[in-house]
Image (cartoon, grey):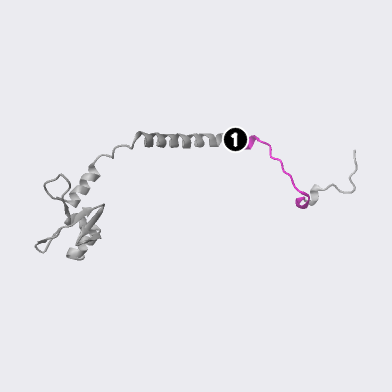
Amino acid sequence: MESRGNTFRARVSADQIIFEGRPVSPRGMTLAIAGEGRNAWRDLTLKLPGERCFTSALAIRREQERAPASLPDSPVHIMAAAASAMSDALKTALAPVEHSNAQSMPKYERRGSRHRRESDVLGETCTLD
């Protein structure tokens, strides 16, 4: 990053940006160099492995956004995702069948003696036919 006529550099090591001997975020680096009011996407430039020139972080970001979707995972992951989708589809298709089966079964109501209503008990005046 350039600020006030000076060039400041950091390096990337194991997925961390190391600036002045400590790990920082891109935003943290711009704050340390120039203070508030700076945009890390706009102000930082990167030199990627194998590249000869520096490129702005914003240009790399826009290129990534325009790039087509990433390559598919390995065949094992693709097959696992397909199997999961088919399983979910089968469960969804069987839900109406299970509901219909549940509706067609007779519902029996059984009450224990302490849960009986008074009208459930035959009166003493009841006689056999």
Q: Is residue 82 above or below residue 39?
A: above
Compared across the picture, whether 6 is left or right of 23 comes to left
Provide residue 117's location: percent of width, then percent of height. 77, 51
Image quarter of the C terminus = top right
Residue placed furthest toward the left? 5
Residues 37 and 8: in front is 8
Image quarter of the N terminus = bottom left
Residue placed furthest toward the bottom? 35
Q: Is residue 31 above or below residue 99?
A: below
Magenta residues span: 101-116
Residues 53 and 123: in front is 53
Is residue 92 inside the magenta stretch? no
User: Which residue sits at x=53%, y=34%?
Assistant: 94
How would you rate the neighbour count of disc 1 (Cα within 10 Å): few for under 14, some for 14-19, many for 20 or more?
A: few
Residues 79 and 109: in front is 79
Provide residue 2's location: percent of width, then percent of height. 12, 59
- The type of residue carrying mark 1 is Ser
User: Which residue sits at x=26%, y=52%?
Assistant: 15
Compared across the picture, whether 43 is left or right of 107 comes to left
Label 1 residue SS: helix
Q: Which residue is mark 1?
A: 100
User: Which residue sits at x=90%, y=40%?
Assistant: 128
Provide residue 98's location: percent of width, then percent of height. 58, 36
Say which quarter of the image contains residue 19. Answer: bottom left
Provide residue 39's location: percent of width, then percent of height. 20, 58
How many numbered tags mark residues here? 1
User: Which residue sits at x=17%, y=46%?
Assistant: 49
Residues 92 and 71: in front is 71
